[in-house]
Image (spheres, helix red, strand yellow):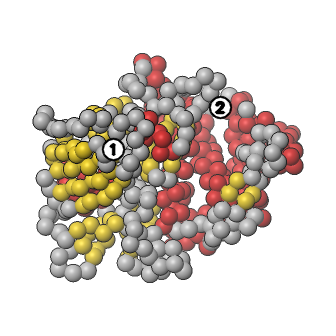
Amino acid sequence: MPQVDDSVQTVADSAFALGPDKLISLLEGERLEADASVAAALAHTDGGPRTTSLPELVNAAPGRAGIHFETAARAGQGGTDEPSPRVDPAFLAEVACASGVPYAREVAHVHFPSSGITLLPAQGTRQKSLIEAGPEGVRVTMRGAGTVHLGVGAEGRLLLADDTSVPSGVEARITDELVDGLRFVTHGTAIAAVAGTDVTPLSARLSPSELACVHEAVRVLDRTAPEFLEQLRSPGFSIVPLAGRPGVARQSLSHRQLPGVVFASVTSPGEFIDLVCHEFHHLRLFTLDAAFPLLANPSAGVLSPWRSQRRTAEGLLHAIYVFAQLSALFGRIFDTYPAAEAGNQRVATWLVCMSVGLELLRECDGQLTEHGDAVVSRMEADTSESLRGIEKLVGASVIARLRTEVAAHLAQAGNADSRAPRYLF
């Protein structure tokens, strides 16, 4: 079992780095750097495994024995033979094709991010599919629908050949649209259903106004947070633009079973940056927590400054972490593009909620692990410093008012008739 005691500071640093995502984990007692959201070990035919990053794996010579995917060994529980659910199997199938390594995996959805190919089953179908990959290409067997064969093109990318046989009830299509290096994918409702919501992905390309929104968002990030923009442009990451809904101004979601996918509406540049950053860091924390558990009792109940009802300690930790990342990102943006009063008020609200949320998290029965304590301690220090900074901009009276409003919300929260906090609207 890997020893993780010496990795506490590394984990805390990984959680807050704005640079390219280099989450550190341990495999077979060695450190392993994970590009995208997955790590792998290439097993040589001559014996013991060695750690490797995905770029090394892609360039590996054929003839290896196979791929052993990272398993997150939890403290006191030992390892498991099952790959982490944060691994994107379709992405790894592409890697397997490029490296000549056989690979098979049952999956709930089929989207090959580097190649931009999505297989959509019949409406309402949620049966799993079997992906079988190797140097000759990929065969996808969709339960109850048939088999789709995909060939290998340049640089290991998969191709929909002219003679590709697509069974009745299955749609195979090139779905990706690259906009300033960001990958937008029309997944369809079959993928949205995995997250258990009623959101509807766009069924068409981005409109001129949506394209203009993305262009401006990318321009802002390129000037203020180029490292974060680089992460959004990574091959294993996709954005699913959402269709508007009556009465819903902004929508976004992510899911731990879709490790490289963010669903977000495309309205204004600021809101788009907000939503994508928010969901991106939910996915990042899922990955971090899979390798290094942050809470011993993540399902413990706790009140939240953001919710009318009680939520889990894991949910509260996610909320605090995501808003910590948002406040850091928008702090960098506002250093270049000074915020209007509403922007500063919004950040002040985030920070006050984070401050109170951190107190609630410490007091609840979630039981922070050593790694969790390191991450939370970092957020406590950063939040205190940021609160002092925003107080100089909005005034002490605004911070005091927000604290009073959060306290009033918590006093009535957790009941069947509890109201959502009005300071979030």
For residue 48, side relative to residue 390 (left or right) = left
Q: Position of residue 354 (x, y in %)?
A: 71, 51
Q: Residue at x 31, y 45 (%)?
A: 144
Q: Is residue 113 visible in the rendered structure shown here?
A: no
Given residues 54 and 341, the one toward you in this image is: 54
Residue under the image location 22 percent in, 37 percent down: 166
Q: Quadrant of residue 366?
A: bottom right
Q: Which mark is residue 339?
A: 2
Image quadrant holding the N terminus, namely: bottom left
- Residue 310 is left or right of residue 214, and the answer is right
Q: Is residue 144 visible?
A: yes
Front in this rendered view, residue 210 or 137: 137
In the picture provided, is 190 more to the left or to the right than 67? right
Q: Which residue is mark 1?
A: 111
Q: Nearer the viewer, residue 415 or 315?
A: 415
Which of the image's four quarters has the C terminus? top right
- Please provide percent x and percent y for residue 255: 51, 49
Which of the marked residues, 2 or 1, is nearer the chain's N terminus? 1
Q: Amino acid at mark 1?
A: His
Residue 194 on image: x %, y % = 47, 45
